Each structure stands twice: as structure tokens, then as C-alpha cells.
Amino acid sequence: MALFSGAALKKTQLTILFLLSLVLLAIVIALSVGVGELSIPIRTTFYAVTNKLGLTAEPLSRIHETVIWDFRLSRALVAACSGAGLAICGAVLQSLLKNALAEPYVLGVSAGASTGAVTIVVLGVGSGAVSLSFGAFVGAFAAFAFVALLTNGARGGNERTILAGVAASQLFNAITAWTISTSASAQQARDVMFWLLGSFSGVRWPELQLIAVVILIGLAICLYHAKALDAFTFGDDAAASLGIPVGYVRLILFATTALIAATIVSMAGSIGFVGLVVPHVMRYLFGPLHRTLLVACAMMGAILMVLTDIAARTVIAPQSLPVGVVTALIGVPFFAVILYRSRK
């Protein structure tokens, strides 16, 4: 039962909760910027941002400004966008597939991205002209195309879609393992495995510009189809009886989630459990109505991912853990608690 029902909350209350979430997100981003070998106070981060926007003219250390703008702020913002995107994808896919265990990589996108990245790094496809991120993106959509082919577009049904995603994951994971075991050096294998487990260490402002656009467009598309998602919760027949073009909407939403997930994986690798756990928590707090649920998932996913990135950089400092390891360590016990509480 929802603690706060999206239907019961007034518009003013939802606005207040949204603004509070934005404030909390800004705080955790500021904390993320301050964490590292060079500790930076929140006050310095605040003035670095306002100076850049032309709102203040506070004198700051050149080193602090460089670290904030060239490295940490872009990393924190990409982490926030990634968390938001994964949570949105999880909420949409759980509704479309009517499966509580559905998550952003159920369509084989992560496995395909891994194959694309390995092909670039290990086999040197493109002779340096093609980046790892682009290779991962192409691989992700190759996996999605494979699933779409097996399921006859969006008309394959929920079980067939999940099975096709499993088949795609197994196929592309096998290709990845074969490529690494036969062609990769020890250093290449270590680099690829660290990337596959998730890391924001290489992201900068160009990646932020791309992922922000993708997430905003994806969220807008999903919100536009929020009523259809509410109907899909009760099954395709119920949605069709309400006049919803089931096949068309399913295809649009599958493609949207695949685009979001492929963009995230191409930049940060495979990061699990965010897209699985966050929608369940937000559904428990705010209810099943997707117009409220999707926004709540985006905000909580962003906050959780930034906090996870902070933990990844501080648990064994000065070394960093892969972000996917931290999300798994947090997500598995948390999800176990959810399953235990809902056992009846």
C-alpha cells in the first residue's frame, strides 16, 4: 500500500516534494564534487558554479576551479542522469512486461554494449577512429534489434520478449567472453572488466550534454504515454479496450528504454539494481500512477546513483570500486527486504 498515493496528493504537495528532491539532489552533487584526493568545501563548489554563471565574482583557487569544472561536476551530473534514466527504464519495463523483476537490461542491451566495447578495445575495429562509447552504443542497439527480430517487433508478448532478451544476453556475453579469452592481453582484459562493472571516471561535459538530452527526451516520451502505462499494468487486453494502440505504444516505449539504457551503458558500463529497486520503492511510497511514479523514480534514481558514486570513491580510497559493485552490494539486501515484506 502506498504511503503517499499519487492520486491523493494535491498538485501543491507534489510540487513541494519535487522541489525538496531537487534540493537534496543539489546537496549530494555538491558532496560528490567535494570528495576526492583534493577535498573541496561545499561553499567553494557553490561559488564556482555561480561564478561560472555570472551570478557572483568570488575569488577562488585556480586548482579548485579546474578540478570542479574539468572533472568532478560533470562526473556527478552524468551519474545523476544515469541513475534517473535507469530508474525510469525499470519502471516502464516492469509495467510493459508485467514482471516485477524486469530491469533496464532485460532486452540484452547491456550484453550487446559489452560486445561492442570489447570489439573496439580488443580487436581495434575502426583503427582508433571509433570510440569505446560509440562501439558500446552500436552493440547495444544490435542486441535490441536481435530481440525485436525474435519477438516480431512489439507483438511477441511479454514472455517471448523476456526469453528473447535472455537469448540475446547469452549470445552477446558468449561473443564477449570468446573475444577476451582469445584476443585480449591481460591489461586489456582488466580494463574491459572494470569498465563493464560500471565507472564514471572517464565522463566529461560532452557526455553530459548527450545523456541529458537523451534522458529528457526519454522521460517526456514516457510521461506522454503515462496513462497507457497505467493501463498496461492490467494487461494488453485492458489497454486495448481503452483504445490504446498496444503494438505501437509498446514498440515506442521499448525503443525509448533501449535508447536510454544504451546511452548509459556506452558511457558508464553496466550498472545493475538501480533500475530494479528504485521503481519498487517509489511505487510503495507514491503508488502506481506513472505520471507521478516516473518523476519520483527519476529523482530518487539520480540521488541514489550520486551517493553510490561517492561510496565507490571513498570505501577503499585512494582506489575506486566499480560503481556496479556498490549498487549490487546495496541493492541485493535492499531488494531481499522488499521481497520479504511482500511475501504475503
Image (spheres, rainbow, N blue to C red):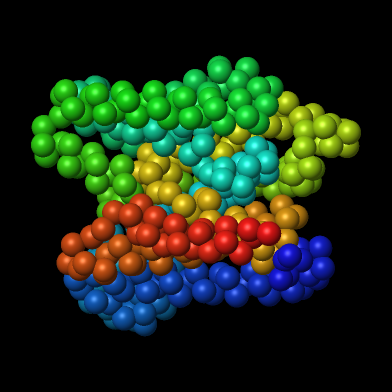
Instruction: Give the residue at x 39% y 33%.
Output: 111
Tell me: 195 left or right of 93. left
User: Which image quarter is the C terminus in?
Assistant: bottom right
Marks counted in the figure total: 0
Of residue 29 and residue 199, the one placed in the foreground of this image is 199
Q: Residue furthest front?
A: 344
The answer to whether residue 234 is above or below residue 181 is: below
Instruction: Give the residue at x 60% y 20%.
Output: 151
Examine the image and state in which quarter residue 256 appears: top right
User: Which image quarter is the N terminus in?
Assistant: bottom right
Q: Residue furthest left?
A: 186
Of residue 112 and residue 222, the one placed in the foreground of this image is 112
Residue 180: x and y in percent read 21, 29
Instruction: Give the residue at x 44% y 40%.
Output: 263
Instruction: Give the residue at x 20% y 68%.
Output: 317
Quick check: can you spot residue 189? yes
Residue 221: x and y in percent read 66, 42
Quick check: can you spot residue 216? no
Of residue 57 and residue 330, the one placed in the foreground of this image is 330
Of residue 301 and residue 272, the one placed in the foreground of this image is 272
Residue 103: x and y in percent read 53, 44
The answer to whether residue 227 is above or below residue 279 is: above
Residue 202: x and y in percent read 27, 50
